[in-house]
Image (cartoon, grey):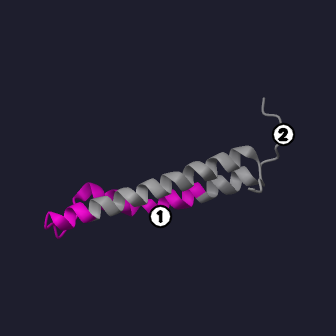
C-alpha cells in the first residue's frame, strides 16, 4: 500500500517529472547506441544543447516541487 503524503498537485508534478525523466533517460540511451552503431564520434549540436540544458531543467523542477510542497492547501486563490 502506497503512503500518500503532501498536496495532490505536488504528487502529480512529482509523478510527471519522474516519468518524464525516465523517458528522457531512455531516449538518451537509444540515441547513444544508435550513434555508436553508426560510427559517430561526436554528437550533433542539438543533442549537445539539450544535454547541456538538463541541469537547469532539474533545478527548475526541484524548485517547482519545493514550492508545491510548501503551498498551503487551504489557501484560496482569487
Say which mark, if any, is on residue 55: 1
Looking at the rendered structure, the secondary structure element under dot 1 is helix
Of residues 27 and 60, which is closer to you in this image? 27
Indicate which disc, 1 or 2, sits on the residue closer to the N terminus.
1
Q: List x then y, in percent, for residue 55.
A: 47, 64
- Compared to 63, does 40 lie above or below? below
Q: Residue reaching furthest front?
A: 1
Magenta region, residue range: 33-61
Q: Judge left or right: residue 24 versus residue 49.
A: right
At x 20%, y 67%, the residue is 36
Whether 60 is among the magenta residues is yes
Residue that label 2 marks:
75
Say which mark, if any, is on residue 73: none
Q: List x then y, in percent, for residue 43.
A: 23, 63
Of residues 47 and 33, which is closer to you in this image? 33
Quadrant position of residue 24:
bottom left
Looking at the rendered structure, the secondary structure element under dot 2 is loop
Q: Residues within 10 Å of mark 1 (few under 14, many from 20)?
A: few
Q: Residue reaching furthest top?
A: 78
Q: Residue reaching furthest left?
A: 39
Q: Quadrant of the C terminus?
A: top right
Amino acid at each position: 500500500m502506497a503512503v500518500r503524503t503532501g498536496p495532490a498537485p505536488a504528487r502529480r508534478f512529482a509523478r510527471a517529472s519522474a516519468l518524464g525523466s525516465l523517458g528522457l533517460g531512455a531516449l538518451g540511451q537509444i540515441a547513444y547506441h544508435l550513434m555508436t552503431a553508426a560510427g559517430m564520434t561526436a554528437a550533433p549540436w542539438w543533442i549537445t544543447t539539450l544535454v547541456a540544458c538538463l541541469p537547469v531543467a532539474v533545478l527548475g523542477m526541484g524548485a517547482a516541487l519545493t514550492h508545491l510542497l510548501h503551498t498551503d492547501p487551504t489557501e484560496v486563490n482569487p
